[in-house]
Image: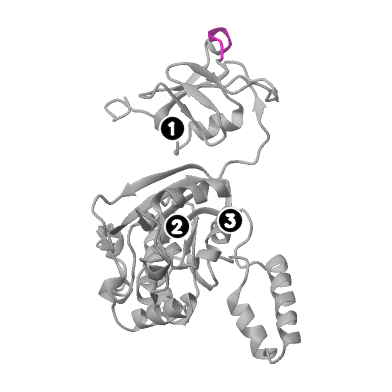
Amino acid sequence: MTVETGVLERYSRGAEARQADLCCPVDYDRTLLALLPQEIIDKDYGCGDPSRYVKKGDVVLDLGSGSGKICYMAAQLVGDQGKVIGVDMNDDMLALARKYQQEMAQKLGSNRVEFVKGQIQDLALDVSAMDSYLAQNPVRKAEDVINLRAWQEQQRVESPLIKDNSIDLVVSNCVLNLVHDSDKEQMIREIFRVVKPGGRVAISDIVSDEHVPQHLKQDQHLWSGCISGALQEHEFLEAFVKAGFFAVSYDKWESQPWQVVEGIEFRSVTITAVKPEADPCIDKGHAVIYRGPFSEIYDDDGHVYYRGERMAVCERTYRLLTGDAYGEHFIGIVPAANVTGTPWDCATGTIRSVSETKGGQHQDKCSPGSACC
């Protein structure tokens, strides 16, 4: 039995009857749960609540959507102008999620949730379309395999399941660890592909404090139970940095491990990240002041920020540093005069002179009485 078939079989059983050992205790928003059918709640398996990061108007993609619980929670938050897409590979879980789709549409006032069949490591391939293709073109010989691959490549280009730069927020709840190790890097690249520039990621998953040895990875029960496929805690973050994300951080970290196997601690975490904007780096005179408490810090682009200094930044970096991901750490200063700007050519660590920034508008996310003030 392969990793993929083991996961499919176990979660198919989970769609039929609740499997208590497939989930961690999670404190979900009870207000959002109140609208959901009990079967969806009972047969959902997760380790966190990424719905907390949803904003009104978001287009949300839930990877490994299962019973649809996070999708239906997110749908209450995105509002009429938003949309939620759940992607899953398990037909039984998709049937369970779709079972209540019309009921939930009536409760929400609109049908803003869609469930599609696909692999989260290949978000361009529409697996339902592939099922239809195979029904008409069964694979019986080597030539059929070649034709199938050609069809897959054409489908990815002409009718991708999830388009490039189309998602405001990607969420997932204890699913990334189920993907085969050989596909995990591609999976995170796919997440990066579909997120809009400036879009976000909120992933709840299981990480390990040590690398998981091979003999545990070969244990199908541990793998399908969200344990032995876990990424090591540092490498989990670094995988998102390598893919091109900024502001990659652990927003939630359970102090107590969910399980300990052969001395290895497995715990629930939630990571957040932002896809940088693709605009060119233009210098219009913007500056930021790093609040502290550290004497200096570096971002993922290698820029250094000295505590209390007015650091020169391009307009694109200014938007990133004063946005949700970094805003509590920086004070922004918009130049007093709006200028056309020039291509950025300042070295990292350049301090913007007071004369350049005097009279500029200050942007400060901290409010009186907040932790950062």
- The residue at the point 38 percent across, 69 percent down is 216
Residue 118 placement (x, y as % from top left): 55, 72
Earlier along the polypeptide chain: callout 3 or callout 2? 2
Q: Is residue 337 left or right of residue 172?
A: right
Q: Is residue 36 left or right of residue 59?
A: left
Residue 71 placement (x, y as % from top left): 42, 64
- The residue at the point 68 percent across, 90 percent down is 136
* Quadrant where the C terminus is found in the figure: top left
Q: Foreground: 219 or 61?
A: 219
- Main secondary structure found in the magenta portion: helix
Residue 60 located within the stretch drawn in magenta: no
Tell me the element at label 3.
helix
Is disc 3 in contact with disc 2, using a CB cutoff of under 8 Å?
no
Q: Quadrant of residue 291?
A: top left
- The residue at the point 35 percent across, 24 percent down is 293
Q: Which residue is mark 2?
A: 171
Q: Is residue 119 above or below residue 341?
A: below
